[in-house]
Image (cartoon, coloured by chain):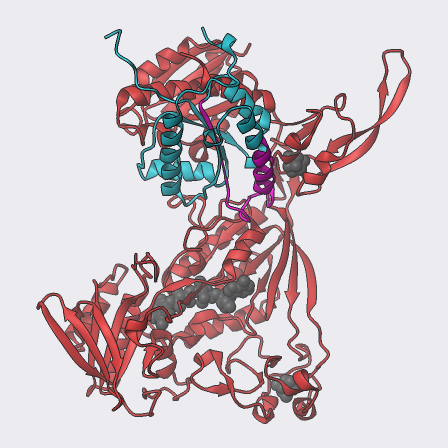
Chain colours: A cyan, B red
Amino acid sequence: MPNEVKAFKPKIVAFCCNWCSYAGADLAGTNRLAYPADVKIIRVPCSCRVNPMFILRAFQRGADGVILCGCHPGDCHYTTGNYYARRRMTLLFSMLDFLGIEKERTRVEWVSAAEGAKFAATMNDFVATVTALGENKRLEDLRCKE
Amino acid sequence: MQKIGVFVCWCGSNIAQTVDVQAVSDALAKEPGVVYSTNYQYMCSEAGQNLIKDAVKEYGLTGVVICSCSPRMHEATFRKAVASVGLNPYMLEVANIREQCSWIHKDKEVGTEKAIILGRAAIAKVQLNAPLQAGESPVVKRALVIGGGIAGIQTALDIAEAGFEVDIVEKNPTIGGKMTQIDKTFPTLDCAACILTPKMVDCAQNEKIHIYSYSELKEVKGFVGNFSVKINKKARYVDENKCTGCGECTTKCPMKNVPNEFNLGMDNRRAIYIPFAQAVPKVATIDPNYCNMLKNGKCGLCAKVCGAGAIDYKQQDQVIEEKYGAIVVATGYNPIKLDKFDEFGYSLSKDVITSLEFERLTNAAGPTSGTLLRPSDGKHPHTIVFVQCVGSRDTSGCGKPYCSKICCMYTAKHAMLTREKYPDTDVYVFYIDVRSPGKNYDEFYRRAVEQYGVHYIKGMVGKVAPRADGKIMVQASDLLANEQLHIEADLVVLAAAIEPDKSARPLATMLTASMDTNDFFTEAHAKLRPVESPTAGIFLSGACQGPKDIPDTVSQASAAAAKVIGLLVKDKLTTNPCVAQSNELMCNGCSSCEKVCPYGAITYIDKEFRMPDRTTRIRRVASVNPAVCQGCGACTVACPSGAMDLKGFSNSQIMAEVDAICQMK
Ligand SMILES: Cc1cc2nc3c(=O)[nH]c(=O)nc-3n(C[C@H](O)[C@H](O)[C@H](O)COP(=O)(O)OP(=O)(O)OC[C@H]3O[C@@H](n4cnc5c(N)ncnc54)[C@H](O)[C@@H]3O)c2cc1C
Ligand code: SF4
Ligand code: SF4
């Protein structure tokens, strides 16, 4: 059916730290806790490894939402990485908001290795929020589109 | 361009059921650089690994992508396989298409599409991988055990047996833990002291073991093989080396009304005390909260009576620094506080007690010298009600959601021992269900019912209400007979849930070891690595990892020791090669990276650079010590010049993954 309007499927990049959130995502999988396939995870050693550049690049390449997950405050494998991440992202997200990328499209969330359920719930919620906002056009490099 | 091989695993049906593995390997075969793409039932099996190895050799692969379970599961397995045929192990990436795909997506089309994208991202990353060489770091041949309960004791003894030095840090004045307070132990009913105290003495006498009692951890730095630890040895105001443990002081001290924690406050001790007769080390300790000399500068009696001249009111906390190759956490558990459970009347009557208090009331060294008497009036109780699952398996938020595991069994023990010693006593046990898996456990419980005539009633206790005449009314439902019961009890014993020690959470933070939502330490893998923390070099022993009885605790303690020994016998460890590196041509020596590095891995060196006009200039540039860097990547983002990058997780690699995921369709 060529004329059928395809339901909007957002593109969502999730950066997960290796020690807590990536393991939390694994646990969500082990417990078969579903969240939409729109979420694709990139493994980083620590939330502090996420360069604002990566997030800008994601939006430039057509991402509709970006979420960064790390260990709970105080639980960082590298002791302080998530504090850096939190500070950097606060700044970046308000700048993105200024540029027209709604604050709801970006998120920082703490998910421990034991919180499979929280991981799935967070992703479900984030996907629903981004889906409601619709496609993101800001910052998108139109040359990337065929 | 790399020559990449792609290997898609079915994981039996775990992946193949919801991901079309053939479609994935076909789609990925078309990606740039992919020269070989296949799928197989079990990539991690020997046959699967051989398939990968053969392909590496046959196609001269320079990069490998495995689409399989989480890299946390088998990345190391696959890296080892490719290394065995001469490919640098860091030229391999894993796309997680099981935990992150097949297990959570039921629709095969959706799962297949996502698996292809995840595979693409891994291929895009591998294109930019570079061979990495793991470094080496030396191993300090000494272990630290935190907590001196039966878990810590067993672990320390086993490590010492293998010939390594072990230090035990115990926060209490004596080692021994909760087991010192238990009277007899299920399922064999041997006395806890008889099996525990010899082990405590062994610890004290073993020249490889050093006990820091009345001490706690202050700081932990470093990493597996090389932890630097600061231990705070609290002032006990008694010189441990001089005190002979004669106990003269503990009978002369005039401060007589200090609640005795060993008997759970059911009797009193003095301000200077030795917790119990078999304490190790057997040394007196002055409680600064009660000692008149320390508080007001008046008294000084114990110094006068001490023949050894051991009393030292001026003693200060002492910080000890030591290096360790491995750390074992054995901080145990505590029964929960029952103040939130008004319905059980714990705070309303002295005759509503916890099971641990019951242990003390039946112990020969306890406040009643082992005769079971009511705490309120010292009379013999004729009707005793035991309530199981108090605060356990409780999803209301008041208690703990988990099963405390030990209470069914110790309640059976208490009920049985009571009936044996006092056959004129009526004993009721209220339970949700009796959990007795374990060797000879069910037999033990059945003996309580069948041989000793304990009344086991399936049902919940609704209310425990003390009456003015000293009786305690227990209102409960009998679910099997479907009737309400009212029992006039003389003593009510509550099997309180157990929880990790309160100090466990700050300790976990210090060790960067993870915990679950209940504050139990998490193991690296629930099934395959149950005694290791996910943090390398940190091991778990005993009830700090989850509720456990003594047989389980001791098994885990010995298992943890085996893991520690396996680590300590190594002279060197290979280090993670995914470390930061600065591009000296781009670095402007601004110090931004140094400030964020939690390990102090970055220093600055003056380096000579050749300029285009053939002159040389000396510039200050950042230099990362790869042996100290842990590879968090904080510095890479802090660097304003883009000079700092992380090997294995480089800016370009992560951007390539972002691009692959966001690729327009
Ligand atoms: C009422 C009752 C009856 C029981 N009866 C039986 C029985 O019959 N049979 C049986 O098999 N099991 C029984 N158990 C279970 C048994 O007590 C445990 O299995 C066992 O004590 C666990 O040992 P552990 O060393 O892990 O913990 P613990 O005994 O709790 O020891 C932990 C030690 O670590 C120390 N510590 C804690 N935090 C720190 C810190 N931050 N720094 C330094 N030191 C620290 C503590 O002071 C303590 O000495 C019973 C339990 C209860 C409550
Ligand atoms: S401090 Fe002195 S009196 Fe007290 S137990 Fe030690 S030796 Fe005996
Ligand atoms: S990656 Fe950078 S900040 Fe992190 S430990 Fe290494 S040098 Fe320090």
Q: Does residue B409 appear to the left or right of B62 in the view shown? A: left
Quarter of the image with the C terminus of chain B is top left
Q: Nearer the viewer, residue B503 or B420?
A: B503
Q: Position of residue B171 (x, y in %)?
A: 56, 68
Position of residue A2 relative to residue A59, above or below, is above
Q: Position of residue B562 (x, y in %)?
A: 49, 52
Q: How many marks?
A: 0
Magenta stretch: give its range: A64-92
In the image, is residue B116 above or below residue B426?
above
Residue at image location 58% in from the left, 47% down from the top: B569
| Residue A89, image quadrant | top right
Left or right for B248, reference B335: right
Residue B149 is at least partly visible in this image: no
Q: Quadrant of the N terminus of chain B?
A: top right
Q: Is residue A112 above or below residue B645?
A: below
* Quadrant of the rendered image containing residue B428: bottom left
Q: What residue lies at 40% left-to-right and 10% top-to-bottom?
A: B29
Give percent across and percent down for residue A83: 59, 42
Looking at the picture, tell me which residue is in the foreground, B533 or B591.
Answer: B591
